[in-house]
Image (cartoon, rainbow, N blue to C red):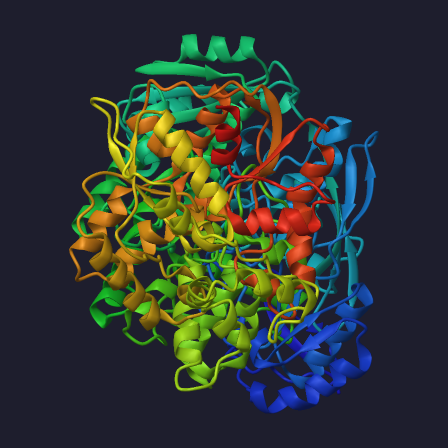
Amino acid sequence: MSAGIWISATSGAYRVPVAVSGARPPGETNGRGGRVDVVTASGELERTLRANLRGDVDFGAAARALVTMDASNYRRVPVGVVAPRDAEDVAVALRACAEAGVPVVPRGGGTSIAGQATGTGVVLDLTRHMNALVALDHAARTAVVQPGLVLDRLRDAARPHGLTFGPDPSTHSRCTLGGMIGNNACGAHSVAWGTTADNVTELAVTAYGGTSHRIGTGWAGAPRGLRELVSGNLAVLRTGMAGGFSRRISGYGGLDALLPEHGVGLARAFCGSEGTLGVVTEAVVRLVEAPRAPVLAVLGYADESAAADAAAELVTGGTARTGPGGGPLTVEGMARDLVGPAARELPRGGAWLFVETWDEGAARALVRAADAVDASLVTDPAGQRALWRVRDDAAGTATRLPTGEMAWPGWEDCAVPPARLGTYLREFRALLAEHGLHGSPYGHFGEGCVHVRIDFDLVSAAGVARFRAFSSAMADLVVSHGGSLSGEHGDGQARAELLPRMYGPRVLDLFRAYKDVWDPAGGMNPGMLVRPARLDENLRFAVLPATPFAGEVTRCVGVAKCRGTEPVGAEVMCPSYRVTGEERHSTRGRARLLHEMLAGEIVTDGWRSKEVARALDLCLACKGCRSDCPVGVDMATYKSQFLERHWAGRVRPLSHYTLGGLPRWLRLIDALRAAGPVGVAARRLRVPGLDRRRPLPPPARESFTRWWRRSGPHPYAPVPGGTEVTLWPDTFTEYLSPVTGRAAVRVLAAAGLGVSLPPGRVCCGLTYLSTGRRDRARTVLTRALDTLGEPDGPVVVLEPSCAASLRTDLPALLPEDPRAPRLAAAVRTFAEALEEYAPRWRPPRLDRPVAGQTHCHQHAVLGDAADRRLRERAGLTGGLSGGCCGLAGDFGFEPGHYEVSVACAEEQLLPSLRAAPPEALFLADGFSCRTQIAQLGEGRGARHLAEVLAEGL
């Protein structure tokens, strides 16, 4: 069968052969008629792919559900997911899909914000296997990479040689080189080192149908017909795309690189094609010299427009691209409405420029020349990292406006020439007000690229109509300033429909012809860039029910910080993903599965879904996502709500009754005075429903409150002017570690605080919450409120997980009970109570190094600043591990979790214990953390800080 497509050019018309034998048009509108039912074709295609690929082929509901969305407002349902092993697998897959008429979408980290990483055909997951750094030549300053390689892994390998990869999007910990090539990504350092296209020299590309191309500079490797297309459209390329600037990314914005005077940059022109031309299977990229001691100048201005005007001045005439001694490396802008409380750490002003320079001398010269309200220099690497973290997280934090409303992408990264940026921002703010919308602009002010998320209503018909009207007006505003609808993230579905407002008809005809030369059958990511879908189609919110839970699930915008492969500082999220490397075990993956469960199109069994249950099974409920996710996704709560409905009316797993009902069992053991025989039995016998490798910690022979009543008189009286605190006897302190409670009483009393206990049993309900028995948790918490009454002072909770639950879960579970928020506000950790209510007390000087674990719930909900200050005053040096210990309450005891639990401990905790000096004290305020250390810590146990301080009194 012969096939072809007519391409018109200024020199006439000619026929370009189609390389796909027997191909049918893919099952999605592509502008040339013909449609195959993709779903019907999928069964045969799946069998073909399984028979011929060495990689993974998964057409199941869970695999498809995980890739329906990227980080955009859009959702498209694929027929299957393929994770190829190598370029040969890619060719086989593209050949099979072309024969079946099924479109293909290449996907990296899935952090695209315009919808281009979603599709209705086969999604190629290039992160699972094709993620290698093939070679690094530090002398030549080049690297050979596969498309699924995460950017930070390349930067880590280049760092020992004093090199780096110049483009650095804020998603550098999870975005892939293939995705960066697809979107022509830039990042903060583009002032110095340009876009991805500026840093790519060669590409290996496989086209739809399986043909392979190796392209760089010159016509070698070009698809048939491309040279003729360019030679016939030289005038269009020279005039229709003239007047560009560094951030002109929209459409095939690099197409003029094919001009002879530009060296026929085939690889450069391919960058930014958003998966619509072919699949990159390997790339040769340039590396640049990394600054050895960069300095960050933070410049304060009255407002963002003043900062934008100043940014243009800072980069005018700069020579940053020539190396040390040149201009600024970065010129990033943020306003107060985005920075929020972090503004307290910044110079005076209503907006700021973060300007990185090669060295301190250049920074001081820049500050002297800048007309800033205030300025500061940050030379300390840790201080710089903290400030850059504010900037890196902005893609997520910008989704939550100061009012608490959610804001969405859509106009995330348009750009104008830097000299026009100040005026543009003033007009942009006016346009927002005109449409009754709000957003917080920030971004690469030095290159005129602005990121913003806007509080669109993308659910109601009126809201979607306003979204469309604003988008049209916004496109006109950007174009009126000579700008680009996309400045680094690509057009995807969000803006491709509006490209006629930016480019003339002859340029758009050329774009279509360029696409058709590379992809004559139209199978590569159809609906993007040319012949696009409407910008208000396929919105991901349309399929969801109008329920509070659905509103919470949509909070995940897909920025995928949870897919980071290494923990950053004390961050916790997402331990199970870092162990398994599987998307379904990331916070984003779980949120996507819950989204599809609510939609009911792919995951069709609702709250009984086995796919969702399997994904949530490895969630440790560490709450790390609550604090580490830029948008505050709270997967521990979502898991609890899912388990409540999933097991409603059914017999639950045994662990839900054993460890989930731990407070009741321990109370019964204590009442029967059976701690001794139960402890012996727990060590020798296997407890049904629990992993046999996990011995249960034995209950104490005397509970904390029995000791309290026996050792009277109580309460301890505070010193004159002192405060009386209520010590909350949590389940773990009460029955399993009363020594912690006794130590806390000694220390609090020594600090001059009065101590009392509630008049009866209290419980935070955490074990019931974690197993989804939420009604039982409400009952337990209501009883605790009845028992405690109105607290007259602070309530000290020694177990971090219980303190976190009382602070956050209690008010959420009992929203109508006015006592709930009052108790939540009264809760203090042990260290917080000493710092706040006994500020003049001096702890004993212990002068010992420490190692151990900060409880993940403390990190996520409570914070550990008071603990660090208390340890410092006691002469306890060294830090505690971040991350999660891996035991996580009942998680590490449940069948099927042991290996993941141990692997989580091996990430940070256990290596820190092994590296600790022999004289080090092991600290862990969380009972689970102490249990994990006792069982895996090679014979050395850990203690609560209260125990260590009491021993030193």
Q: Residue at x 30, y 51 (%)?
A: 454
Residue 417 in picture, x, y percent from top left? 42, 35
Could you say which is closer to the camera, residue 238 or residue 532? 532
- Horizontal side of 519 relative to 145 (left or right) equals left
- Tell me if I can see residue 367 in this picture: yes
Q: Quadrant of residue 639?
A: bottom left
Could you say which is closer to the camera, residue 835 or residue 301? 835
314 shown above or below 743:
above
Residue 619 in picture, x, y percent from top left? 54, 62
Q: Can you say which quadrant of the picture contains the N terminus?
A: bottom right
- Horizontal side of 544 relative to 386 (left or right) equals left
796 shown above or below 718:
below
- Horizontal side of 129 relative to 613 (left or right) equals right
- What is the number of callouts on the image? 0
Q: Residue at x 26, y 28 (%)?
A: 718
Could you say which is closer to the camera, residue 381 or residue 411? 381
